[in-house]
Image (spheres, rainbow, N blue to C red):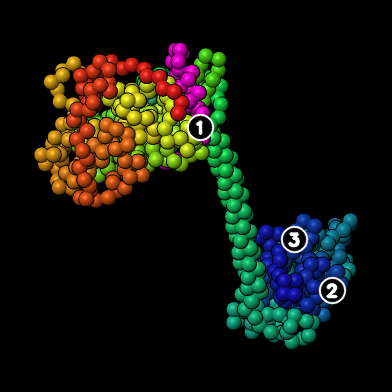
Amino acid sequence: QQDDCKPTRCYKHGPTIRFPFRQKNHHPQHCGYPGFDLSCSPNSATLLNLPNSVEFQVTNIDYTSQYISIKDPDRCFIRQLQNLNLSTTPFQFANDYLVDFSFFSCPSTRQAFPLSRFPCISGDGHEVYAGFGSTSTGYTDLKSCRKMYTVRSVPRGVYYYGVFHVHYLKWPDQVCGKCEGEGKFCRFVNNSNSDELECYNPGDWKRPLAIAGVTGSYLLLVILIAMYLFHRQKKIKREDHLKIERFLKDYRALKPARYSYTDIKKITNQFKDKVGQGGYGTVYRGQLSNDVHVAVKILNNTKGNEEDFINEVRIIGKIHHINVIRFVGYCADELKRALIYEFLPNDSLKKFASSDHNKHLLGWKKLLEIVLGIAKGIEYLHLGCDQQILHFDINPHNILLDENLNPKITDFGQAKLYSKEQSVVSMTSARGTIGYIAPEVFSRNFGNVSYKSDIYSLGMLLLEMVGGKKNSDVMSNNTNQIYFPEWIYIRLDSGEELGNVIQDEEDAKIAKKLAIVGLWCIQWYPVDRPSMHVVIQMLEGDGDTLIKPPNPFVSTNPTMVPGQASGTAKGLINKKLEVIVEHDQ
Ligand SMILES: Nc1ncnc2c1ncn2[C@@H]1O[C@H](COP(=O)(O)OP(=O)(O)OP(=O)(O)O)[C@@H](O)[C@H]1O
């Protein structure tokens, strides 16, 4: 209800209209004291409406001093005086010197001097003059004039200052004088039309507005925050969705998929980044999406490669192990063939096998971890899949390292699948890399080909890591050069240190453990080699209880290898390789 009485103005700089005044047709009756009606003219002037249709323009309202400044809107103040009867209003002129004066209508031909002339109320053929008092007594010049009317108790200035002057009306002190004097506003008690007035703090009507304002702003803030949260949530959801989409795209890609050669060009950015060259092809770095980096091996278009291609896709395509490279896909567009793998940024183990400096950087502890990883990967291939997978080409080239130097077995071109029940497998041609091939793969005279052939290769890799020599060095023509696994055996036997990069006892212990395990793995006869499970146990144990294996380098029955002086490993490896055909067992 208080809002109904909110102060108003007729125009921006016009006087404020509030209790005891009210704006007619705007404020309800209770907002103003009786007789204090103001209205706004069509040209936005503030008008005081008094009885007898008297209207003054209000130029100012001084609520504290309780007076208003008035003037005639038509610039003829004097005209209003005829109908003005302030006794029926709450107002009276504020001027302390009030006078009565009378108006006279004189013929235009006559100058009623020294009376004041008021042209704004004069008419055709007559002039209006005014003189003090209620009669024409004393004014000799008014003989031919007619007295019109007398106004009483009007400010003397009306007479002297003509029609334009601003005059002041005041209202009785009891109407709000006390409140305004205290710096407060006033209103009817309970905002009703009762006669009783009360003072109130202007803040009181402002407070609800202020509260409304604060509540409004608060609400607006809450709405804005809610909108922000809603949009953020939507954005997060959209991002989540994109993330899932990206993941699914990558996931689809991680299930080995077939790619066209055009895809391959896109993935490798037109073969921009070559990362390696192998015997069967060139390797390029590529990217499937923002998250998946891949290595793309473009196979040489040479005869025999197709076997490796089929083998690789068939075998590695369906296995997953932390120590086996992840196969991403392949391309077989007519003669263009490619294999796509996860990208491994740390090159192959060869880098560390052949350099004391790199091995030093790696450290023996990490080396042990790597060897253990390879052993676990091989064990998985042998036992962890539907079929037994024999790799037949375990060597440092085929062990790649990821960003954390975790080893990953790669290159399944030589691998073969067998049923798990088969303890002995058939093989029609020698496979593998010279220096790492088990004797039985060359000749069944040394035993049957089986998973133990991979164990032999691992043993060779292990000894190479310990000895720091290239295994294939044994193929050099320098026959005086001692076969390096034998060199390791001799040093182990005599209790000498095993490498140049051993720094402390811990290193020495690991080197010794790796050497013993390696020598067990390269036992001449497969039956003497441990299974991968036992190899893992030996590598995980503390090494002190490990027993040195029998010397694998003593002469074996020379008749077993036709045309060869000795059946030792060195002799075998130095021999020209021949393919030995074996029948299925
Ligand atoms: N997945 C991979 N991530 C990163 N680099 C790789 C990857 N695969 C291969 N490379 C790089 O490419 C080189 C050649 O690899 P590739 O497998 O073709 O050759 P290799 O094993 O050395 O020889 P071969 O072809 O005779 O088996 C590797 O030495 C390595 O540096």
What distance separates the C-alpha of mark 2 from that of mark 1?
A: 107 Å
Please, what secondary structure does the residue beneath circle 1 have?
loop
- Quadrant containing ligand 1 reads top left
Name the residue beneath numbered marker 2: 51
**Residue 286 visible from this viewpoint:** no
Q: Residue 498: x and y, percent?
A: 15, 37
On the rendered image, what quadrant is the N terminus found in?
bottom right
Q: Quadrant of residue 500?
A: top left
| Along the viewing direction, whichever of 213 and 190 lies nearer the viewer | 213
What distance separates the C-alpha of mark 3 from that of mark 2?
A: 19 Å
Q: Earlier in the sequence, mark 2 or mark 1?
A: 2
Q: Does residue 311 lie above or below 500 as drawn?
A: above
Q: Does residue 487 lie above or below 208 as drawn?
A: above
Frontmost of labels 2 and 1 is: 1
Disc on res. 45: 3
| Residue that appears at 18% across and 30% down | 554
Amino acid under label 3?
Ala
| Residue that appears at 44% across and 23% down | 583
Q: Which residues are magenta?
A: 298-327
Please, what secondary structure does the residue beneath circle 2 have?
loop
Disc on res. 266: none
Residue 182 is inside the magenta segment: no
Label 3 Cα neighbours within 10 Å, binned few <14 / some 14-19 / many ≥20: some
Q: In the displayed structure, does residue 255 sit left or right of residue 353? A: right
Amino acid under label 1?
Gly
